[in-house]
Amino acid sequence: MVSHSELTEHIYAQDFDRDANTIEVFVGRLRKKLPLGLIEPVCGQRYRLLAP
């Protein structure tokens, strides 16, 4: 599982202004490209990548 903050830290440099909605947009785009149900939210602040 990966949290929103872990994803944000991995994507942006420390001095970059971070938008909270960006992670949801990226995950939404990934979900459209990957098989249905491969990425699932966990407790609203983490994501889990499931085996196909």
Image (spheres, rainbow, N blue to C red):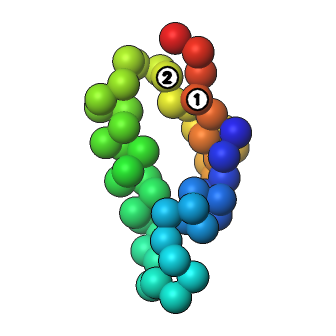
Q: Inspect the image, locate mark 1, and give the three-letter code of the amino acid beneath it.
A: Leu
Question: Do the numbered discs 1 and 2 sit on residues whose CB atoms are within 8 Å?
Answer: yes
Per the image, label 1 sits on a secondary structure element best described as strand
The N terminus is located in which quarter?
top right
- Residue shown at 49% from the left, 22% from the top: 38
Q: Inspect the image, locate mark 2, and give the three-letter code of the amino acid beneath it.
A: Leu
On screen, residue 12 above or below 4: below
Q: Which residue is mark 1?
A: 49
From the viewer's side, name the closer residue of 13 and 44: 13
- Residue shown at 46% from the left, 57% from the top: 23
Q: Quadrant of residue 33?
A: top left
- First reached walking from the N terminus: tag 1 or tag 2: 2
Which circle marks residue 25 in the picture?
A: none
On screen, residue 42 above or below 19: above
Residue that extends furthest to the bottom in the rendered view of this protein: 15
Which circle marks residue 38 in the picture?
A: 2
- Residue shown at 57% from the left, 82% from the top: 14
* x then y, percent, for residue 46: 65, 47
